[in-house]
């Protein structure tokens, strides 16, 4: 059985911004005809499960205006620096949001955050061999980041928070569950930091 090839017949730009664009596309449908689909084209993001030698992970609590409350999340950020490799972006976000560096970085999981309306892809890395960023080299946080709360908790406790509905950020849910699975498998299933994104 062959899959239908969804072709874009026309595209109308609705909004163009720094992080995402909103477009309406006319797409061919199986059986003939077309349909209009609104979508958000996103620059993409990285997130980091930072796991220390004691088996604790770094969580941040950050205000997210679209949901109107603080959420438990992983250190994370946009793929918005031209030419920056994804592992470097992950390490940059880890330093900026958690004041940490990592001696080892591997890929945990990739996810489409909400494929019903956006092409956003998030790569979640596992960072180990952690060290503190020197105080005089730390990033100065602004806006919502100025209110960040950074904590370390046991990985199993973080997984319990996911299953209890206390952690709902998609990248955090996927990353923490993947990290627990990777740990239980002796970290043998990790992909190299430079592995290509899924197409």
Image (tube, grey):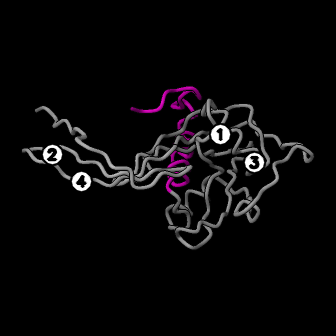
User: Which residue extends farthest left?
Assistant: 31
Q: Earlier in the sequence, mark 3 or mark 4?
A: 4
Helix, strand or loop for disc 4: strand
Q: Earlier in the sequence, mark 4 or mark 2?
A: 2
Crowd class of label 4 (few under 14; some 14 to 19; many from 20; radius 10 Å): some
Can you tell which mark lies on residue 77?
Answer: none
Quadrant in the picture for residue 87: top right
Can you tell which mark lies on residue 96?
Answer: 3
Q: In the image, which is nearer the foreground, mark 3 or mark 2?
A: 2
Can you tell which mark lies on residue 29?
Answer: 2
Crowd class of label 2 (few under 14; some 14 to 19; many from 20; radius 10 Å): some
CA–CA distance in space, label 4 to label 2 = 10 Å
Residue 182 image offset from top left, x and y in percent: 54, 39
Helix, strand or loop for disc 2: loop
Q: Please give the residue where the numbered disc 1 appears in the rendered image.
A: 90
Helix, strand or loop for disc 1: helix
Q: Please give the residue where the numbered disc 4 appears in the rendered image.
A: 36
Which one is nearer the viewer's eye here, 98 or 174? Answer: 98
CA–CA distance in space, label 3 to label 1 = 10 Å
CA–CA distance in space, label 3 to label 2 = 45 Å
User: Is 59 covered by the magenta stretch?
Assistant: no
Relative horizontal placement of residue 139, taking residue 51 as reference (left or right): right
Magenta range is 170-199
Q: In the image, which is nearer the foreground, mark 4 or mark 1?
A: 4
Image quadrant holding the C terminus, namely: top left
Q: Earlier in the sequence, mark 3 or mark 2?
A: 2
CA–CA distance in space, label 4 to label 1 = 36 Å
């Amino acid at each position: 059985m062959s899959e239908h090839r969804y072709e874009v017949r026309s595209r109308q730009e609705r909004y163009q911004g720094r992080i995402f664009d909103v477009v309406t596309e006319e797409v061919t449908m199986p059986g003939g005809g077309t349909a209009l689909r609104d979508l958000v084209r996103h620059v993409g993001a990285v997130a980091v499960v930072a796991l220390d030698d004691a088996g604790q992970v770094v969580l941040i609590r950050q205000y997210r205006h679209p949901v109107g409350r603080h959420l438990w999340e992983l250190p994370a950020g946009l793929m918005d620096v031209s030419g920056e490799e994804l592992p470097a972006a992950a390490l940059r976000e880890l330093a900026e949001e958690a004041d940490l560096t990592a001696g080892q970085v591997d890929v945990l999981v990739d996810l489409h955050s909400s494929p019903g309306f956006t092409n956003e892809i998030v790569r979640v890395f596992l960072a180990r061999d952690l060290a503190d960023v020197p105080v005089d080299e730390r990033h100065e946080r602004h806006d919502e980041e100025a209110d960040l709360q950074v904590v370390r908790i046991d990985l199993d406790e973080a997984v319990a928070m996911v299953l209890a509905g206390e952690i709902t950020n998609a990248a955090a849910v996927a990353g923490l569950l993947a990290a627990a699975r990777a740990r239980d498998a002796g970290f043998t299933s990790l992909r190299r930091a430079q592995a290509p994104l899924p197409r």
